[in-house]
Amino acid sequence: MSNYLHQFVYGIYPYIALAIFFLGSLIRFDREQYTWKSDSSQLLHRGSLRLGNILFHVGIIGLLFGHAAGLLTPVWVWDTLGVTHSLKQGVAMAAGGIMGGLCLAGLLILLVRRFSNDRLRAVTTAGDKLVMLWILLTLLLGLSSIFVSASHMDGHMMVLLMNWAQHIVTFRGDAASFIVDAPLVFKLHLFMGMSLFVIFPFTRLVHVWSGFGAIGYLGRAYQLVRRR
């Protein structure tokens, strides 16, 4: 039973999560565009919003791209560049610790701001609470994994995680086998991270899509304003 559960969670569930992520976002954009927003609370109470927002977004963007580059870059690329597995693990731990620390600090500031103000508490939805709690737990698990990684700096676990991620995105059915013996903190972190994609379309997280869409403005022609 445990083997079946492991295969489901780490071999099948990733595809379920991604399907919900993409299809759910598309359906929400098509049917409920008026709910497609970040629900900013700046007008209700400014407080430490700017500091918390900057720390949180810098940290989480760094984590997003760091995870993508670290997990999805083929192992042979690092080997060709002469980057040893232990060095890559050390860099990943340092970068993840810095970005994770920034993200955690920003999130805690935003949590204190939101729940210490009566007006903000009144407009905080169940979805908001779910998102903040889920990100917080995912962050804490990720930061905790750094201490576990420090006990084995040979890079072996890093390579197994890379193989798992790369086998998932290339639709190979043996992905789950790479992390059978992974420490529990890694497995929980992976599960929480994958589940973020599940709750994404049903919460304010959808505004992330708009952030990527704004990149297109960089290539737009200048607006010409002529005098009468």
Image (spheres, rainbow, N blue to C red):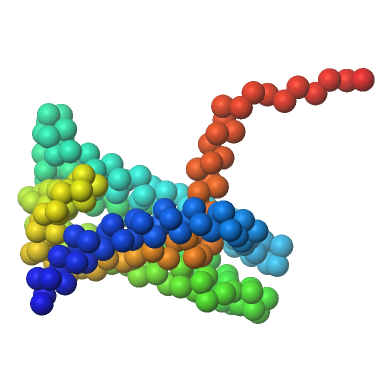
Instruction: Point out residue 129 in the picture as x, y percentages from the top left corner.
Output: 49, 74
Instruction: Point out residue 43 in the picture as x, y percentages from the top left corner.
Output: 71, 62
Look at the image and tell me in which quarter the C terminus lies.
top right
Kindly indicate the quadrant of the structure image that contains residue 226. Answer: top right
Kindly indicate the quadrant of the structure image that contains residue 4. Answer: bottom left
Q: In the rendered view, does 66 fall on the left or right side of 33? A: left
Residue 193 visible in the shown view: no
Instruction: Point out residue 41 in the picture as x, y percentages from the top left corner.
Output: 65, 64
Residue 7 visible in the shown view: yes
Q: In the rendered view, does 154 fall on the left or right side of 97? A: left
188 or 104: nearer the eye?
A: 188
Instruction: Point out residue 72 in the picture as x, y percentages from the top left corner.
Output: 24, 43
Q: Residue at x 40, y 57 (%)?
A: 21
Q: In the rendered view, does 128 fall on the left or right side of 68? A: right
Q: Is residue 22 shown above or below 3?
A: above
Q: Residue at x 46, y 59 (%)?
A: 24
Look at the image and tell me in which quarter the N terminus lies.
bottom left
Kindly indicate the quadrant of the structure image that contains residue 183. Answer: bottom left
38 or 10: nearer the eye?
A: 10
Q: Residue at x 53, y 41 (%)?
A: 213
Figure label count? 0
Q: Residue at x 14, y 53 (%)?
A: 173
